[in-house]
Amino acid sequence: MRRTLAAWLAAALVATVISVVTAGLGGPAAAAVTPPGGSFTGVAPARLLDTRTGNGAPAGQVAAGGSVTVLVAGRGGVPATGVASVVLNVTVTGPAAGGWVTVHPAGTTRPTASNLNYNTGQTVANLVTVGLGTGGTSVTLFTSAKAHLIADVTGWYATAATASDRAGLFHPLRPARIADSRTSFGFATPGAGVTRTLQVTGAGGVPASGAAAVVVNVTVANPSTAGYLTVFPFGQTRPTASNLNFAAHDVRANRVITALGTGGKISVYNATGTTPVIVDVVGWFTDATAAPGTGGAYFVSMAPKRLVDTRVPIGEIGGAIGPDEAAVQTVAPSDGVPAGSGSVFPVAVVGNLTAVSPTTGGYLTAFPPGFGKVGESVPNTSDLNFVAGDVVPNLVITQLHAGALGIFNKSGTTHVIFDVSGFFALPTTPLTLSSVYHGANDQLIPVMSRNGQHFAVSSWASNLVAGDTNDVPDAFVIDKAANTATRVSVSTAGAQADDATWEVAISDDGRYVAFVSGATNLVTGDTNEATDVFVRDTVAATTTRVSVGPGGEQADNWSYGISMSADGTKIAFLSLASNLVADDTNGAADVFVADLTSGAVSRVSLSSAEAELNADVQGGLISGGGGHVAFITLASNVVAGDTNAADDVFVRDIAGGTTSRENVSTGGGQAQPGAFGSTLTALSISDDGNLVVFGTWSPNLVTGDTNDNADVFLRDRAAGTTVRITAGGGVQPGGDTGYISGDGSTILFTADPPGLSPQWRDSYGATTYVLDIAGGVATPIRGYDYLSPIQTGLSTDGNLMLVYCPVDDPLPGDSNSYLLTLP
């Protein structure tokens, strides 16, 4: 049965454990990790085997059904020890009949998989990544028909024990075209004996610096004569090796892994005729300048396993793939490849993709499948080209998306085979995902106490408690362990509310629950026909309205937008009322704080000179300690020199009676409107009021902000510094969501595609990161696309996080909201 994109999406979000992987923002890793595999070292192409000349094996064609074993360790730039696997370009020439070549570690049983298919008399090459056998020294090449065999080494992978923690780590990319000489893109079409130069760094997702080697797919399209191409580092002597052999008027591709030369460039040599060349990039390897632990995947070699064969069929794809059709195969988990829920997280697969008996000429593309239509997922690249009735293989190194590989067939009907020979993986820390409440008959988006011990929610669900017949949203306290709920939007006498409850907050001890409601029957004398702020004391079983003026006078307008201090004794809220405090004459929404201990309500959206604001306040948050309130306003009279006519972030020190503007540069420069004006997208404050996280479109708060996008910033009020956190490693994807833990140790934020580094991205949605401020390390949350933090969902110590997953329910019946335990 065909596994289409739609079917895969329905099954991709089943696991109950997800992982984080370490990606750096420029600082050192918080802790060392154990490499799951080897790091890569590229070498200048060197010939290790040529049976035509007797290099590496006796001269003469290898007999049909015969094998030749080649010593690799200690030759061609490969070390004598500490090598797990090698990258070889294997060529067959002059075969007596059609057949195939299989390459495997010496001394092991030959697998039922092929690396290279050929026709009678054909000269054809394919890239092979293979483990070393016989004590880590040699590989064996088998040919089904009599033929000459050639093998050129282009690089090697270390063992896990000898792997580097910085150089040679792989960063997969969504495939991107970086050259097409048919249109003079990248370089002009080379003639006979001509070498072209291609700038690789800075193109197709490869960074401008920090890359040592690159993985590309090189295709020739309608060459005038038979010949070959050689790809090598720019600035180095051209080796006596080839990467791609072809016949006249052929369309043929081969994978190439090559070290980068001077200036991040590669050279492409064309031996004969006029040969149009296409180059697609799929990934790159770090150089030694990378900071330890700042990202990159390790290669794990495995015995080749047939994962897909549509002729049988084997795998989830089913039968042959039709024209303009994409199918999806799960790779992680599969036989030999882990799911990514333990200590190893696969991010890319290495394998041989073969087109078999296509009905017309065309091409296949391997790609990371994403959400949406096929046309939105398939890149404008190809991995192998074929003519009708052909059998054509090519090595693919492809980024996985939620553990899956996509295969796209352009035209005709084509059978496909896919043999996995390894994968690139990241060391991970498993994280547990648990439900806050199971079984609600409507959506729950809970809030969490600052210490992460108590939960509350406003919901339309009618089956959380008995007797819920008011048909409006209510506020509930959730006992996560017992999976029970208690309704708190009730009167002191226990009567259910006669109107909706929309917001909720809960204290660290779970005693106090604040909520916003339009109900008129929760307290006596509620006749203002406006939403009010109430507090339920769950110990005393009392409900009190706190959005009141002197003497308990009810508000003359709407109150909303609540937040609570950790101990529950101070509640900040917004209100349009003019009678909560004396001399409120601005006719604007202000921020007020209700003190449950004293019973007083005070206005805190004031200037340091106690002047009321000349514009509305749009959002306000009280700190966990209750001593500071952060708010957003367009008002121009809060501080002197406010001339930007834009929304700004302010912090009010309640005890000190001072107000300061915080969305400023380190030098104190005020924010200027960006592409979407003065929009502020996030606001959060630490318990002590010193650290403020905010999101803004303003482009002038840090130097080099050129992404024309929203970003998340961290403001240290005591130090007077402002730092952008949605940028790092030479990329600035932007992002609009950020929350800081109460203790100031952790920031939860989102970065837009492609994220802070390509291999971490959720290809079709923003990626959520957890930033360790002291260590400077961002940890992306992996495993589910569109996983987003809930606003009040980060505990004081940064160890617990409430998340929302709108695409599907990882834990069915849990209404899309979950508690994630962080390391």
Image: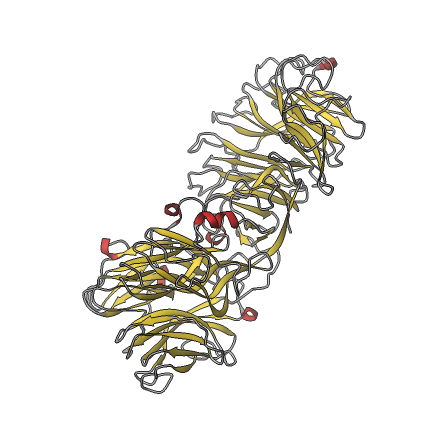
**Could you tell me if residue 766 is visible in this image?**
yes
In-front residue for pair 395/469: 469
Residue 218, above or below 14: below
Residue plotted at (37% across, 58% down): 320
Which quarter of the picture shows residue 818? top right
Residue plotted at (27% across, 78% down): 94
**The N terminus is located in which quarter?**
bottom left
Measuring from the top left, give residue 680's x and y in whole percent. Answer: 51, 32
Which quarter of the picture shows residue 240? bottom left
In-front residue for pair 549/1: 1
Q: Colour mode?
A: secondary structure
Residue 705, above or below 269: above
Measuring from the top left, give residue 339's x and y in whole percent. Answer: 55, 58
Residue plotted at (36% across, 78% down): 144
**Could you tell me if residue 754 is visible in this image?**
no
Residue 693, above or below 514: below
Measuring from the top left, give residue 636's x and y in whole percent. Answer: 52, 22
Measuring from the top left, give residue 138's x and y in whole percent. Answer: 46, 79
Extreme residue toward the right, this view: 540
Extreme residue toward the bottom, this view: 58
